[in-house]
Image (tube, helix red, strand yellow):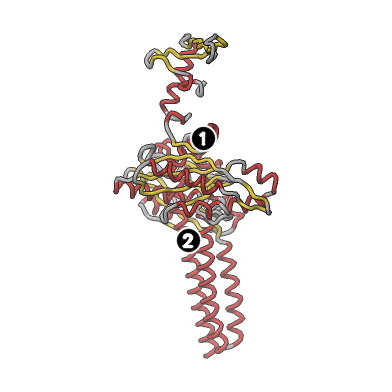
Amino acid sequence: MSAVAVLALGGVLFHVLDSSIRSRALASARQSAVLTARAVVGPHVTRAGFEDGLTPKQVSDLDREVSQGLRSAGISRFKLWNRHGRVVYSDDHALVGRRFPVSDELDEAFDGEIASEVSDLEKAENVAERSDGQLLEVYVPLQMDGSVVGASEIYVPYSPVLASIRHDVLKLGLALALGLLLLWATLFRLVASASKRLRRQSEENRHLALHDSLTGLPNRTLFLDRAEQAILAAKRDAAEVAVLILDIDRFKEINDTLGHGAGDYLLRQVEPRIRPVLREGDTIARFGADEFAVLLPRLDSPETATIVARRLRRALDQPILVEDLPLAVEATVGIAISPEHTDSAALLVRRADVALHVAKAARSGFEVYSPKIDAHSKPRLSLLGELRRGIAEGELTLHYQPQLAAGSCALERVEALVRWVHPERGLLPPVEFLPLA
């Protein structure tokens, strides 16, 4: 009877351990899926995209987000479904546009609930993933204008969890063979160790999904989530939020000359240099390569962002000792402010990046976003079309400006300047249209 009782107790404990591991893994996958749906799908897909299909630009934007962020987070497959059971996006483009039977979990997501399961990949749309074995499958409802328009589907590998279960089962069997007393001592240690190991693995997986592996800083996904929350809080308090995109000048030259080890060391020194000039609630993130981002929530005025940009550049201006070689590091900064420039976190980051590229081209150190510098803004695109028409209709004229010697006032040379006689805006100087040309 004692042996039977021990075996029964071992079976019960094994079942508890297995259920605990499975439930923790599903909870971690559900949390990752919700963050992904909020940070990746929301900024790029509209209601029309679910109803009529995504545009090539939306597909391209999602492909970029998947390749940059989701793969590094350990996500195996990503799909978007509309309410008719049609795949409107998948990182496997062969599935896009196809209709499949709606599963119970997908139907539950259409009802507004997050659904998850350990999938054996027996559905028709899972042919490409069957070589991966079991996967954690999570469906997240996607709401727009107060109603569910579709769902996102994410697969996370289940193999690490299965390996952990097999490892603990082996130890459990050996412990049962040693007897009642040894079983009690060992079983407690195994359960505690397995729970601790799973908790640590879950924390590490979540950290890797939301942080840069080299610097430990938040990555783009976590930064966008924090920016979205900061913008919502700023709306309530009538405050402003700024995003600063920071790029290390001549980093490629340093990397090529001293090697990737020196480059990695330099990147790890960025956060300790700039953290002292920021507030406690500000966020520093690394987007990749030599590009960093700073989130400034609750600003009193837009001028504060430019003050911080100057401080960031001065903080990095001090030489950094790399392999006994003092390197003078400079940085270029692009700034975008909410709500002045946009109230979307993803668009705020893009517009700060536009300002960064303008600052690098002008060698000005930093620039604040303006629609005038954005090649993709509506006024600029409109002016581009008018310029094509103006050239065809001969609206561009040539003006000659004499240059005189300061001492004798003698004519030394003549500067030729083009002007655009715009039919509505009058005479436009070159700075208004030459960048477009």
131 above or below 80? below
Q: Which mark is residue 378?
A: none
Residue 419: percent from left, percent from top: 47, 14
4 above or below 430? below
Residue 76: percent from left, percent from top: 56, 52
The three-letter amino acid code for the residue at tag 2 is Ser
Badge 1 element: loop
In-image side of 11 versus 233 (left or right): right
Asked whether residue 59 appears in the rendered view, the answer is no
Q: Which mark is residue 28?
A: 2
What residue sits right under mark 1 in the picture? 364
In-image side of 231 versus 207 (left or right): left
Crowd around label 1: few <14 · some 14–19 · many ≥20 (10 Å): few
Q: Residue furthest front?
A: 407
- Please name the residue shown 60% across and 56% down the image: 132
- Please name the residue shown 47% across and 43% down the image: 310
- Please name the residue shown 59% across and 58% down the image: 133
The three-letter amino acid code for the residue at tag 1 is Ser
From the image, state whether disc 1 or disc 2 is nearer to you.
1
Residue 289: percent from left, percent from top: 59, 46
Quarter of the rendering containing residue 52? top left
Asked whether residue 237 appears in the rendered view, the answer is yes
Tell me which numbered mark, 1 or 2, is placed earlier along the sequence: 2
